[in-house]
């Protein structure tokens, strides 16, 4: 039986109407779990949320293989969305679905969730032969990949995976993503009355400004970027400011260049603060690690064959953003990111579901598991 457009769309319209901002995925998880259980599947829940104060853990589904000896395949989509996501009013227009412009649509990543549900239905209905399948529906992706970071990996044995979190065309395959580190600095000077005794003060805003003005930021080279995104500090015009907070980030496809860029930013902040008689506390956090899948790696080879069955050549892409795939790759599951039909995510005006490419994505998954056990 071909992929069922009406059924897929009904699932999608139902899920996008359920708000699921990061950390608050309980309601949507309940509905997804029910749909999976209706297919006779067992749905496990891990305790990932306890690590970051969310209300819902990741959902994990395992489907036994009907064929001996085939490689276990891993699939993923995330349950949470960015905001504003309350009271979403989806509008179907031809081959697209959009919101009414007040909220996001949530195709990122409910399109991926619905593609996986429809895929599992087709496997069952059509009695399609496949190897073992492991699926993680993750939570809190949009706020630092927290669900994936705290996923209970003892429950996952797959080493090859596909993350459904990208847009059309169907043959676009993301094989490379950067590492990202975040910077949080507090520059400290000394408070004083700005009119009465400014010479007793050390202006933290000025110390921070000197460091930032001297900093290499923006596009550093083809594979490296850096940004200072937030500065906060000061209390009033008549007080020499004692403290300034600086938030920034750097990304690179080359871990060595990332280290260099971060070191450059930290050194400048520390040295400028010291030079002016103040000090700086700088904290660096790993947001995610880069990955690079080559054309000879199993997920790339499999997706190439699956696309060929549909008459496509893969378009290998490099992205500048992170996704759960970064975390899975660093956990030893070689993953690429593939299309689920989502377009212009995070934009209330422009986010769309492209229905045709979402349905193609279901076909693609069926081809993947079929080729995997031949
Ligand atoms: Zn996403």
Image (cartoon, grey):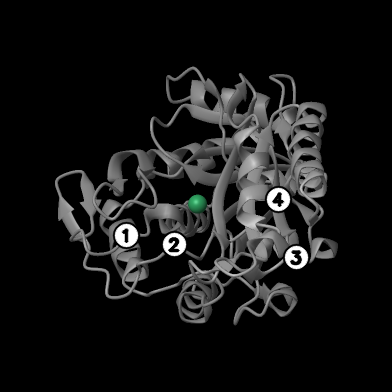
- Tell me which label, 3 or 1, sits earlier in the chain: 1
Is the C-beta separation of discs 1 and 2 under 8 Å? yes
Is the C-beta separation of discs 2 and 3 under 8 Å? no
Q: Under tag 4, what secondary structure?
A: strand
The residue that appears at 39% across and 48% down in the rendered structure is 345
- Residue indicated by mark 1: 104
Residue 150 is marked as: 3
Residue 70 against residue 254 in the figure, above or below: below
Q: Percent position (x, y) of residue 150? A: 75, 65
For discs 3 and 4, the disc positioned in front in the rendered view: 4
Quadrant containing the C terminus in the rendered view: top right
- Residue indicated by mark 4: 183
Q: CA distance from mark 3 to mark 4?
A: 22 Å
Q: Percent position (x, y) of residue 18? A: 37, 75
Q: Residues within 10 Å of mark 1 (few under 14, many from 20)?
A: many
Q: Percent position (x, y) of residue 74? A: 68, 49
Q: Under tag 1, what secondary structure?
A: loop
Q: Under tag 2, what secondary structure?
A: loop
- Tell me which label, 3 or 4, sits earlier in the chain: 3
Is residue 180 visible from the viewing direction of this image?
yes
Residue 82 is marked as: 2
Quadrant for residue 188, please give it.
bottom right
Pick whichever, 101 or 270, lies toward us: 270
The residue that appears at 34% across and 57% down in the rendered structure is 8
- Tell me which label, 4 or 1, sits earlier in the chain: 1
Q: CA distance from mark 4 to mark 1?
A: 29 Å
Q: CA distance from mark 3 to mark 1?
A: 26 Å
For discs 2 and 3, the disc positioned in front in the rendered view: 2
């Amino acid at each position: 039986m071909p992929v069922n457009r009406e059924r897929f769309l009904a699932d999608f319209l139902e899920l996008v109407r359920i708000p699921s901002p990061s950390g608050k995925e309980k309601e949507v998880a309940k509905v997804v779990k029910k749909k999976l259980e209706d297919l006779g599947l067992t749905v496990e829940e891990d305790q990932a949320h306890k690590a970051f104060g969310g209300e819902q853990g990741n959902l994990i589904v395992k489907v036994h293989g009907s064929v001996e000896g085939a490689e276990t395949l891993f699939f993923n989509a995330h349950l949470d969305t960015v905001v504003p996501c309350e009271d979403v009013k989806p509008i179907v227009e031809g081959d697209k679905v959009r919101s009414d412009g007040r909220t996001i649509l949530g195709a990122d990543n409910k399109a991926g969730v619905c593609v996986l549900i429809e895929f599992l239905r087709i496997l069952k209905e059509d009695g399609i032969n496949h190897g073992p399948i492991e699926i993680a529906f993750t939570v809190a992706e949009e706020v630092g990949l927290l669900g994936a970071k705290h996923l209970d990996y003892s429950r996952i044995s797959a080493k090859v995976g596909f993350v459904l979190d990208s847009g059309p065309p169907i043959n676009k395959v993301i094989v490379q993503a950067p590492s990202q580190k975040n910077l949080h600095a507090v520059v400290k000077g000394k408070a004083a009355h700005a009119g009465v005794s400014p010479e007793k003060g050390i202006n933290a805003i000025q110390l921070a400004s000197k460091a930032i003005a001297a900093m290499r930021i923006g596009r550093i080279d083809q594979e490296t970027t850096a940004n200072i995104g937030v500065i906060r500090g000061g209390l009033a015009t008549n007080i020499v400011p004692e403290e300034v907070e600086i938030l920034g980030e750097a990304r690179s496809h080359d871990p060595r260049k990332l280290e260099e860029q971060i070191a450059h930013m930290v050194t400048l902040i520390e040295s400028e603060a010291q030079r002016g008689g103040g000090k700086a506390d700088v904290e660096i956090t790993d947001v995610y690690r880069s990955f690079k899948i080559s054309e000879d790696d199993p997920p790339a080879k499999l997706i190439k064959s699956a696309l060929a069955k549909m008459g496509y050549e893969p378009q290998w892409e490099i992205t500048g953003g992170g996704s759960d795939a970064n975390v899975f790759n660093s956990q030893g599951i070689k993953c690429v990111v593939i299309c689920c039909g989502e377009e212009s995510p995070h934009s209330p005006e422009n986010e769309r579901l492209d229905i045709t490419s979402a349905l193609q994505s279901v076909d693609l998954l069926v081809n993947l598991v079929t080729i995997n056990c031949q």
